[in-house]
Amino acid sequence: MSSFARAPATIQAVSHSQGAGLSRNVSLVDQWGHSRQIEAPRGPPVELRPWDGPVTLADTVGLRQLEGAKPAASSSSAPLARLARATRRVRDYQRQFGAAYVVALLLRSIVDRALIPIDTYLLRVEGTRGVLGPAHRGYRGHTALDNRQQWSAFDWSYGGEEWGPPEGRAALVEDELLRRLPPDPVIVEIGPGAGRWSAELQPLAEMLVLVDVTDAAVEICRHRFGEVDNVEVLRTDGASLPGIAPGSVDVVWSMEAFVHMAPVDVAAYIGEIARVLTPNGFALIHHAGRYHRRGWRAPMTKELFARLAAERGLSVERQFDSWGDGAFNVHASHDLITILRQHSALSSG
Ligand SMILES: C[S@@+](CC[C@H](N)C(=O)[O-])C[C@H]1O[C@@H](n2cnc3c(N)ncnc32)[C@H](O)[C@@H]1O
């Protein structure tokens, strides 16, 4: 996990959760334009605490949690503990299935390891040519389930504030959102987490719809924005914008979420973005910019993202990796931010 660079030493307090009661009614519009009411649970109260530590570019998802949650394992004893666990598992398998099974299992794990550099090569070739080829389509990591597990286990009590300074958020909104924003916009945010960016978007939106794959994030956002009339929070299967009508959204926004999604899910979401955007609509999406395995990045490149968009009827308006006159950037993980437009916006002049 990394966020944008240039961090001041401290961060302002995050607004605390508000609201009471066990549920509230949320109105949804389905793909045929019919509206319906659902009762959305508020979820447990989440005490969002101010983050006053350094804003770090942690290279591993949940680095803070790993540091905090596993202080006992010293670096020298960890390999021994792993070996002991593996030996126990092998003995269990042998008892349960026999020696031949264990040999087959070992062979399979050796083959799996040997395939990693081959897969990496294939992904790099496809990625630089911008092709969603067999390696990307067959990529098995960063699924919706993986993300759900990853982000369910994450400690959200600092609201994600440790990933980037509020000044960087304000600057991105100023540079890239405000000058494109139509009046009374409907905004959809994909992967809001604890609502760090949502709090910037909410005052600007006629309606803000937050869509996340992880129950914890959905519950935190429902709780945090529970008393705000213009926010709805939806849970997704990880590749679609459920219940959002075609051509009904002015802006789709996503920071720090697409970088962790499997390429097939990114492709599906881009199709969904094309479906829901109005003719003048645009999307601002932060995604991985080249293939590497640090920061729990999924395979994606500048070229592939642009190709996926073009194939789904969207134009690339801009791809960039710094803003605020260069004061903020997503260089550390070689990420990019892409602004997409509906093609029909261009043809209508
Ligand atoms: C690193 S957190 C970022 C949260 C927030 N955008 C921020 O910057 O503070 C990633 C978020 O994306 C969500 N996410 C991951 N994969 C997703 C998917 N396939 N669809 C929707 N949300 C997803 C996670 O549940 C999590 O809330």
Image (cartoon, rainbow, N blue to C red):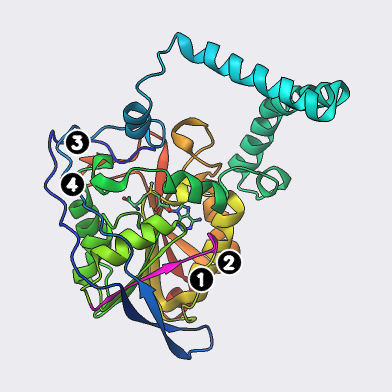
Marks 3 and 1, how far apart at CA: 34 Å
Asked if disc 4 and disc 1 are in contact, CB closer than 8 Å, the reply is no
Marks 3 and 4, how far apart at CA: 18 Å
Q: Residue furthest right?
A: 100
Judged from the image, the secondary structure of the residue bearing numbered disc 2 is loop
Looking at the image, is mark 2 or mark 3 nearer the viewer? 3
For disc 3, the marked residue is: 7
Judged from the image, the secondary structure of the residue bearing numbered disc 4 is loop
Look at the image and give the residue range highlighted in magenta: 229-239
Q: Residue furthest top?
A: 76
Marks 2 and 4, how far apart at CA: 41 Å
Where the N terminus falls, by quadrant? Answer: top left
Position of 208 compared to 134: left or right? Answer: left
Position of 123 compared to 340: left or right? Answer: right
Q: Residues within 10 Å of mark 3 (few under 14, many from 20)?
A: many
Label 4 is placed on what type of residue? Arg
Picture disc at residue 274? 1
Asked if disc 1 and disc 2 are in contact, CB closer than 8 Å, the reply is yes
Asked if disc 2 and disc 3 are in contact, CB closer than 8 Å, the reply is no
The residue sitting at 16% across, 57% down in the picture is: 16
Picture disc at residue 49? 4
- CB at disc 2 and ligand 1 closer than 8 Å: no
Picture disc at residue 312? 2
Q: Position of residue 335 (x, y in %)?
A: 41, 41
Check the image and report above or below for 8 versus 209.
above
Marks 1 and 2, how far apart at CA: 7 Å
The picture quadrant where one finds residue 73 is top left
Marks 2 and 3, how far apart at CA: 36 Å
Label 3 is placed on what type of residue? Ala
Position of 191 compared to 6: left or right? Answer: right
Looking at the image, is mark 4 or mark 1 nearer the viewer? 4
Chain-order first, disc 3 or disc 4:
3
